[in-house]
Amino acid sequence: MHITMLGTGYVGLVSGACFSEFGFQVCCVDKNQDKIDNLKNNIMPIYEPGLESLVIKNKEAGRLTFSNNIDKEIQKADVVFIAVGTPTRRGDGHADLTYIYEAAEKIAKNLNGYTVIISKSTVPVGTGIEVKKIIEKINPNANFDIASNPEFLREGNAIEDFMRPDRVVVGIENNKAKEIISSIYKPLFLIETPILYTDLKTAELIKYSANAFLAVKISFINQMADLCEKVGADVHDVARGMGLDKRIGSKFLHPGPGYGGSCFPKDTLALIQTAKLYDTDISIVETVVKYNQKRKSDMADKIIKIFNGKTENKKISILGLAFKPETDDMRDSPALDIIPKLKKAGFKISAFDPVSMKEAKLLLNDIVFSENIEDCLKDAEALVILTEWNEFRGLTASKLKQLMNGNILIDLRNALNPENFNDSEFTLIQIGRPTKNKIIINQ
Ligand code: NAD
């Protein structure tokens, strides 16, 4: 079985490497020449724990290759996965399907013998059928089936998620494609992973429902956190008390500055557009999208308010820029909303993230990018934690005292243990938790 992975980004590269680890012959192709050249030289285009060693291992075993010759690799394939991006279309919130349709045309022109074409990209309901029509129009004699296999991996934990997923969803039109896909996922079947076969449209919709539901869950706990702050309750205990109820579950009940990343923001917007097209009420998701956008801006206001508006030339240190730990992905990271607003308010900002600095430098202007945590914190009036990297969790009052000028810790991820700061001169402000010490602003 020869698998061609069209698109070598977070999903394509991880899936390609994992399928080769299952023992299949996989070629990852991409229209970005540099990406493929780098991968041939073992240079990863993204930061993802465990990815580099998995790629190198399978390359050396001869099962994983990289190529820019997309035409040739489609001709050789028994299975073509589409793993290209589906960003938000500028101006209207729909998923931009340009890359999907480009891929469909490319596939149509190069199909050679029976091939199963499987979309791993997140695409609006009906896109699979559209891809099929494009291929049939360009190549009426093509012998192929179409399938939808939405990907649920999380950046930062992508390999584990791929190798041990909660479930695999497969939308198919007939048994011939089902047999091939079930042979690809046989290693997961052996570890009793539930594999859910549906029709194409249902599979496409499952992905959007799952992401939108998680966005709702995060926003719910964020709103509860706001209420906890007002009434003096602790949102962590509220979340624990809720999460122990098996009907609710404890995951995605961690408050923060609003969700970001490459999926939730664009997928919630796209789902709203789909609902509009079909004249269906999806007001829950609409509310969440609006609230989440406002929340990021509110977080900047919260920081400005802590300084009583005396923000001009105050130095604050931002730890964490990526939308979550263990990734360098900056797409829709809350940092991109919060930092510019703080800049505008007059703060002098230094920032540090363990892996996303290269990406961040392309997106954020006029701030100091520090080499390490210590440089970042030097002489700061306040520390703001925007991403909960493990290495920030261990910061102690004595270390911070050595480095900082002020005594304010604004932890928008609740990464620090409040007990470690109880008897210190620091004021620790977290999300949805009571603040114990008095705030002192250095003039
Ligand atoms: P990405 O932007 O990291 O990678 C997409 C890659 O496709 C790029 O390298 C691009 O050059 C390449 N490409 C675009 N058009 C191409 C073409 N015609 N031929 C060959 N290569 C082409 O995107 P991603 O984050 O991997 O996401 C891919 C899809 O998977 C999206 O639909 C996304 O919503 C979905 N998804 C992403 C994640 C995630 O965590 N990133 C998780 C689940 C699902």
Image (cartoon, helix red, strand yellow):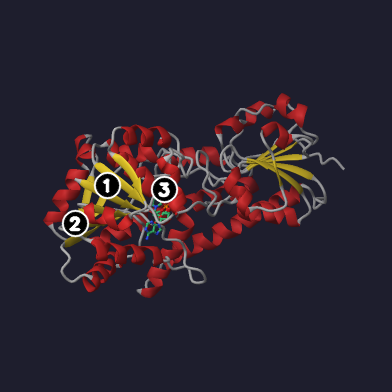
- Name the amino acid, label 3: Ile
- Name the amino acid, label 1: Val
Eye-nearest disc, 3 or 2: 3
Residue at the disc numbered 1: 168
Distance of label 3 from label 1 (alpha carbons): 28 Å
The residue sitting at 22% across, 47% down in the picture is 2
Residue at the disc numbered 2: 115
Eye-nearest disc, 2 or 1: 2
Say if 220 sits above or below 396 in the image. below
Residue 302 point in image, percent of width and height: 69, 51
Mark 1 surroundings: few (<14), some (14-19) or many (≥20) residues within 10 A: many
Q: Is residue 178 left or right of residue 307?
A: left
Q: Which mark is residue 36?
A: 3
Residue furthest to the left: 175
Residue 234 point in image, percent of width and height: 58, 39
Quarter assignment of residue 318: top right
Quarter assignment of residue 120: bottom left
- Is label 3 in a helix, a strand or a loop? helix
Could you say which is closer to the camera, residue 310 or residue 402? 402
